[in-house]
Amino acid sequence: MAKKGFTVTDHRSGKSYDYPTVESSRGPKGVDFRSFYKDTGCFSYDPGFTSTASCKSSITFIDGEKGELRYRGTPIEKLATEHSYLETCFLLRVGRLPSEEELNHYDLELRHRSFIHEGLRNLFDAFPQEAHPMSTLSSAVAALSSFYYEHLEMNTEEEYREMARRIVAKMPTLAAFAYRYSKGIPFIYPDIERSFTENFLYMMRAYPGGKMHIDPEGERLIKPIEVKALDTIFTLHADHEQNASTTVVRSVASTGAHPYVAISAGISALWGRAHGGANESVIEQLKMIGSVENVDAFIAKAKDPDDPFRLMGFGHRVYKNFDPRAKILKSLQDQLKEELDMDNNLMRIAARIEEIALSDDYFVSRKLYPNIDFYSGVILTALGIPRSMFTPIFVIGRTIGWVTQWIEFKKDAEQKIVRPRQIYVGP
């Protein structure tokens, strides 16, 4: 419950104003400054919203100083190692982990909702073949609102449930179609006999007719460890509090736009190299470094204040400790190297950079720890995922977070259309 907690004195008039404290269940409290402009005639000035809370939320909690991430109160370490992505999706939407029966029903529903309307399938033909999968994916999701326009007006929990499960189920199909179209190869439709994550790999890798490559030892192309690795990546990306793309989704939601249009806007925001596109940049940089022998020279460039070179995959806007998601991916990377005998050049370069950064005072004193992008790009490369699909995979994982945040916003009676103010400095 809000209570009086902060007093601001306007030294121009000598008047003082009390502003209530907004309590939290974890982390910093807030100060309700909604009447600040009316009281003082001034705006707060906070570029990037580094000290501004835009909402109350019960979905995700981050403590950047401790390196802590929780979904609905459950530590990410527990979810990523003991539960599946679909269990995590259920948790984010419903607020608790599912029973075995609920999970089976949820899984089955998503499998059957994974197909897309043939009219939407034909939309891909309008794009140039060289289009990046992210631009195609964003457009396809926006178009999805035309096929399910009824989701514009929702009043019951059942309507919210159907809308959310539909977009979560269809996103892997749209992403796989976007990739295959960019390569000029036939689309592979979902296989309802396969799990959520395996199905995505199947739609990415299968030949026409649904045939899968068999290696010389008679094993299927999709190995369980690969499914587990990608499922973990989906879980780690499922939500991350009020990041840039989630804020975009909530902002578009505030206008009354269709939920799929809001998610399309989130996809566009995520594509930015400072956001979800960062793991592509990590791989580009590792390829530029070229070999382990060149690492020390590039580390020196990163430490040179007069050199514009910046080491990608280190540091985070929120985490001032080791990103907990990065720790999980580090362990997963080691497991992949052992089980799949992966020891490629990029992994060796990344390992050398990591070794230096974790022991060099320049990085340690500045709290420039490896982040999730540093490991995810290397792991996805090791799994044979094309670089152009790194961010679409991020989209697949984050869709459940976006749609959950959208629903929470719509149900929050205190929310209104997003309309920041400005400090005018023009003529």
Image (cartoon, rainbow, N blue to C red):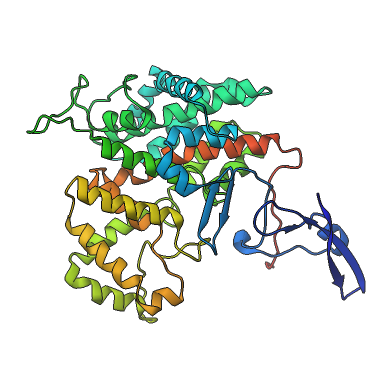
Q: How many marks?
A: 0
Q: Note whether residue 132 is visible.
A: no
* Residue 117 percent across, percent down from the top left: 41, 18
> Taking 223 as reference, is 281 above or below it?
below
Q: Quadrant of residue 384?
A: top left
> Taking 152 as reference, is 327 above or below it?
below
* Residue 87 percent across, percent down from the top left: 47, 33
Q: Quadrant of the C terminus?
A: bottom right
- The residue drawn where x is 17% and y is 55% is 344
Frontmost residue, 28 versus 164: 28
Frontmost residue, 46 versus 165: 165
* Residue 412 percent across, percent down from the top left: 72, 38
Q: Quadrant of residue 38?
A: bottom right
Left or right placement of residue 295 versus residue 156 in this view: left
Left or right placement of residue 361 versus residue 75 in this view: left
Frontmost residue, 386 versus 360: 360
> Taking 150 as reference, is 83 above or below it?
below
- The residue drawn where x is 35% and y is 68% is 311
Q: Note whether residue 9 is visible.
A: yes
* Residue 84 percent across, percent down from the top left: 42, 36
